[in-house]
Amino acid sequence: MSNMHVTAKVNGDEVEFLCDPRETLLDVLRDRLNLTGTKEGCGTGDCGACTVTIDDRLVCSCLMLGVEASGKSVGTIEGMAEGDTIHPLQESFVEHAALQCGICTPGILVAAKNLLEKNPDPNEEQIRYWLAGNLCRCTGYDKIIRAVQAAAKEMREAS
């Protein structure tokens, strides 16, 4: 099977790549575009480690083919920071020790950012519901929830 040409917007930048039509978006991001922040946890869409946004919708990149990104806007963990300034969520995760091994962290951050874009003042139940598709084996979830709440508050106060 021959490679296909794909044009997409990744983290705001127009990109072009060739990929095997059977190649997952996760593999394209990591192996073709060198965006290695997105992690593979399970390869079956159960853990959320590979979460990215496609046109502002959360997607497990291990379940999507790279060719399906054609003409779409893809958001990864690398797109969260603005230059050398990390996103308030990233800062809050560090401050609240809401990460350990780091496999789940990029997917959780992408999902949490997506939540705060839609709901800048979520309660604990809403945060837990939104992040339910992201599994963490190391931290438990309390520090993650507290970090999202703190970042949400900071972001509301800044705007």
Image (spheres, rainbow, N blue to C red):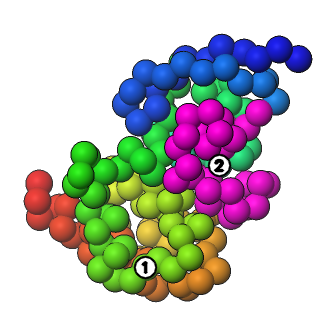
- Circles 1 and 2, Cβ within 8 Å, touching? The answer is no
For residue 65, side relative to residue 97 (left or right):
right
What residue sits 69% from the left and 41% below the top?
A: 27
Which contiguous range is marked in magenta? 23-51
How packed mark 1 is, by other alpha carbons closer than 10 Å (few <14, some 14-19, many 20 or more), is many
Image quarter hosting the N terminus? top right
Residue positioned 11% across, 64% down in the render: 157
**Relative to 82, residue 132 above or below:** below
User: Which of the image's four quarters has the C terminus?
Assistant: bottom left
The local secondary structure at tag 1 comes to loop
Amino acid, disc 1: Ala
Question: x, y (%) of residue 138?
Answer: 59, 83
The reply to whether the magenta stretch includes residue 150 is no
Residue at 68%, 30% (x, y): give it. 66
Count residues near mark 2 (Cα–Cα under 10 Å), then give few for <14, some for 14-19, many for 20+. Answer: many
Which residue extends farthest left? Answer: 158
**Tag 2 secondary structure:** strand
User: What's the magenta bit mostly, secondary-structure-wise?
Assistant: loop
Determine if residue 147 is in view. Answer: yes
Q: Can see residue 121?
A: no
Q: Position of residue 53 (x, y in %)?
A: 51, 42
Q: Name the residue under label 2.
A: 60
Dot placed on the residue nearer the N-terminal end, 1 or 2: 2
Front disc: 1 or 2? 1
Amino acid beneath label 2: Cys
Q: Is residue 115 above or below residue 23?
A: below
Which residue does the numbered mark 1 point to in the structure image?
98
